Image (cartoon, rainbow, N blue to C red):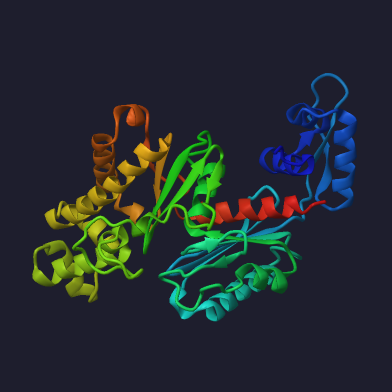
Amino acid sequence: MREPLHLRLLRLLRDLGPTSRAELADALAVPRPRLLAELERLVAAGYVAEAGLAASRGGRRSTLVELNPDLRFAAVDLGATSIDVEITNGRLEPVVAYAEPADIRSGPKVIMNRVDELLAKARIDGAYQRLTGIGIGVPGPVSFRDGIPVSPPIMPGWDRFPVREYLTREHGCPCVVDNDVNIMAVGEKHGGVAQAVNDFLFVKIGTGIGCGIHLSGEVYRGPAGCAGDIGHIQVDGHGPVCSCGNVGCLEALFSGAALGREALAAARSGTSSALAERFAAAGSVAAPDVAEGAGEGDVTCIRLIRDGGRRLGGVLAGLVSFANPSMIVIGGGLAQLGHILLAEIRSVVYRRSLPLATGNLPVVLSELGPRAGVTGAAVLASDQAFEQAT
């Protein structure tokens, strides 16, 4: 079904900025009287404002319209170990941003209270007077329809917590809740390396592993909202027990926690001098230490990254054969492992998938990096608010 005119119009102003009425009518392929009536309604509703005169082109200067400069969206990206919050204007340009460590396992009361505090701080700092919409991503399966996490393996206490209802009630505006990797895929499509691509996979490698599936210009979530949970595909029937309770999942063998565990074993055994030195100095080692060690040429660090890339590449090769994407984007905290990881993933995907599927298949790092999540959350927040601008 074709989207309503007001939604297409508001999205166009969001993405293009100040635009003349004539240009809007042409871009939307609607009669000018209908467009003018819709604009008049949106101005009255507080979503659109006059934006002055366009630059002179020799004739009568046309007037421009834009999204109301007072529109504000809150974008929240909850990770397993972090909270990122941005307040954006109507064009999704950041007004203020906050980032801090947090443990998602501390439960919804603690985490949501902290989100409220950060949003209150943004208001005190003058970032907004009222919010037009909120978008939030969480690191676990989400019922997109209901706005709740459902049995998230690494989020104890969050099962069916009413995230959308809570934020809507506390802040008096529409709210949309999605899985963290889905919002990253939306962000990368809006402002990253996948802007010109309608069919791509966004793979987040961090504390867990997930895949945002973007097909025909839209995120595919599945009927229950858990499409793309590739971290729980089994890759070793005799592997370690995963947080989901199964054995040998990809996430149990290659993720932030898994890599940290292997790095610690290598440091303690002395098989990696680079990791042993860091462990002696700091008392711990983690993924960044592996990346640094690999950069110094440490053989064990390089092997750990390649082993992870080979396992992930094997899973992605299956997805390429199944979905035939035009691009694969790698993001998340472990993307910092860089080109050793990327080269291994590419090697396996290109070797194990059919040439027809990989003949023109870029496998690239996220262009937005850590901002992919908040960017996508802001896009979803604006879409939700615009849909309700009736």
Residue 353 x/y as whole percent: 29, 35
Residue 124 x/y as whole percent: 69, 72
The count of marks equals 0
Question: Can residue 150 be seen at all in this image of the molecule?
Answer: yes
The residue nearer to you, when weighing 66 against 104, is: 104
- Where, by quadrant of the figure, is residue 101 drawn? bottom left
Which residue lies most toward the left here? 270
- Where, by quadrant of the figure, is residue 230 drawn? bottom left
The vertical placement of 310 against 86, above or below, is above
Residue at the location (37% across, 34% down)?
A: 362
Q: Is residue 381 left or right of residue 276?
A: right
The residue nearer to you, when weighing 110 against 151, is: 151
Residue at the location (29% across, 50% down)?
A: 312
| Placement of the N terminus among the 4 image quadrants | top right
Residue at the location (70% across, 60% down)?
A: 133
Residue at the location (62% across, 64% down)?
A: 146
The residue nearer to you, when weighing 173 against 100, is: 173
Residue 340 x/y as whole percent: 24, 46
Which residue lies most toward the top here? 58
The vertical placement of 388 against 266, above or below, is above
Question: Can residue 295 be seen at all in this image of the molecule?
Answer: no
Residue 87 x/y as whole percent: 64, 60
